[in-house]
Amino acid sequence: MLDVADRRRVAILTGCSSGFGLLSAVELAGVGFRVYATMRNPSKRDGPDRAASEAGVSVEVLPLDVTRDESVASAFDRIQAEAGRVDVRAVTPTRVKEAAVRRILRG
């Protein structure tokens, strides 16, 4: 359900189970973004949950496999329904095909 009272900027980041994606998600949440931290396998969400808790922020973890169009569409549909928009899209470096990156950036 769309939360119209939440005026924070909205960010979606890929590859947030570890590394640069995880760090970026926590940092953006720390400066006031509503962060959707995505990863192929959300069972690996312990890292983002722990890092966010330690930083005193929250991130919303979503499954997203950038190589699957239906996964990208599902994640963006959920964010659109909950937040109404995406202000920042960040694809963190992984073994991602160029076409998959374009799908994410296009939204």
Image (spheres, rainbow, N blue to C red):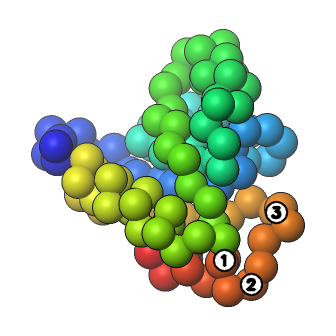
Question: Could you tell me if residue 2 is visible in this image?
Answer: yes
Q: Residue at x 83, y 62 (%)?
A: 94
Q: Amino acid at mark 2?
A: Glu
Q: Residue at x 66, y 77 (%)?
A: 101
Q: Amino acid at mark 1?
A: Val
In x, y percent, where is residue 32? 45, 37
**In the drawing, what numbered circle is on residue 101?**
1
Whichever of labels 1 and 3 marks the residue nearer the N terminus, that label is 3
**In the drawing, what numbered circle is on residue 98?**
2
Mark 3 to mark 2 CA distance (whole Å):
11 Å
Q: Secondary structure at mark 2?
A: helix
Determine whether 7 is above or below 88 in the image. Answer: above
In x, y percent, where is residue 24? 69, 45
The quarter of the picture where residue 46 lies is top right
In x, y percent, where is residue 23? 74, 39
Disc 3 marks which residue?
A: 93
